[in-house]
Image: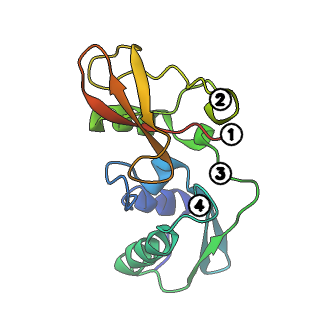
Amino acid sequence: MKYSKGEIWHFLEEVFDPEIPVLTLVDLGVVRDVELIDEKVQVTITPTYSGCPAMRVMEEDIEKMLDSKGIQDYEVKTVLAPAWTTDWISEKGRVKLKEYGIAPPSEELDKSILFGKPPKVECPQCNSTNTHMVSQFGSTACKAQFRCKDCLEPFEYFKCLK
């Protein structure tokens, strides 16, 4: 069965991130490239960080999706350089994060480790920037735990990585 590169990209929009199930791997920017080499499909992915424990699950989910479309000759290739950045999260992905209750990465680089001043993070519930960091670490290494001082809701923030 032969598909176009565009069709493969469309299929990949059905593969969701195992840690943030409202985002596809395409939304997240983990899927870097799709190539058709002769009859072989090559999907290139980059982890959000080199030690990401979900990478094998992501690879398997891509493989299952390709299998389900009748694609038998494929390779899922992981590349580490250039390193993934939150700039690769699509605008659609940022909207989905906020709707899910996770503050999307700020455009401002998080230098809180160096200078002790966390970034201004907008609460995904009430849009207030009157928030504070509770913990540098959330449910995954990619997120920090915040709390809104106005609506008092806790929320996670997807850390800015550049």
Q: Quadrant of the N terminus?
A: bottom left
Q: Residues within 10 Å of mark 4 (few under 14, many from 20)?
A: many
- Residues under numbered marks 2 and 1 in contact, where contact means CB atoms less than 8 Å apart: yes
Location of mark 2 (residue): 109
Gap between marks 3 and 1 measured at Cα:
8 Å
Looking at marks 3 and 4 on the same chain, the residue that comes earlier in the sequence is marked by: 4
Gap between marks 4 and 1 measured at Cα:
13 Å
Under circle 2, the secondary element is loop
Location of mark 1 (residue): 162
Q: Position of residue 145 (x, y in %)?
A: 40, 38
Q: Quadrant of the C terminus?
A: top right
- Residues under numbered marks 4 and 2 in contact, where contact means CB atoms less than 8 Å apart: no
Looking at marks 4 and 2 on the same chain, the residue that comes earlier in the sequence is marked by: 4
- Answer yes or no: is residue 119 visible: yes
Under circle 4, the secondary element is loop
Location of mark 3 (residue): 84
Question: Which residue does the image show at 48% across and 33% down from the upper left?
Answer: 91
Check residue 47 in the rendering and tell me which mark sits there, or answer none.
4
Question: Which residue does the image show at 46% across and 69% down from the upper left?
Answer: 58
Under circle 1, the secondary element is loop
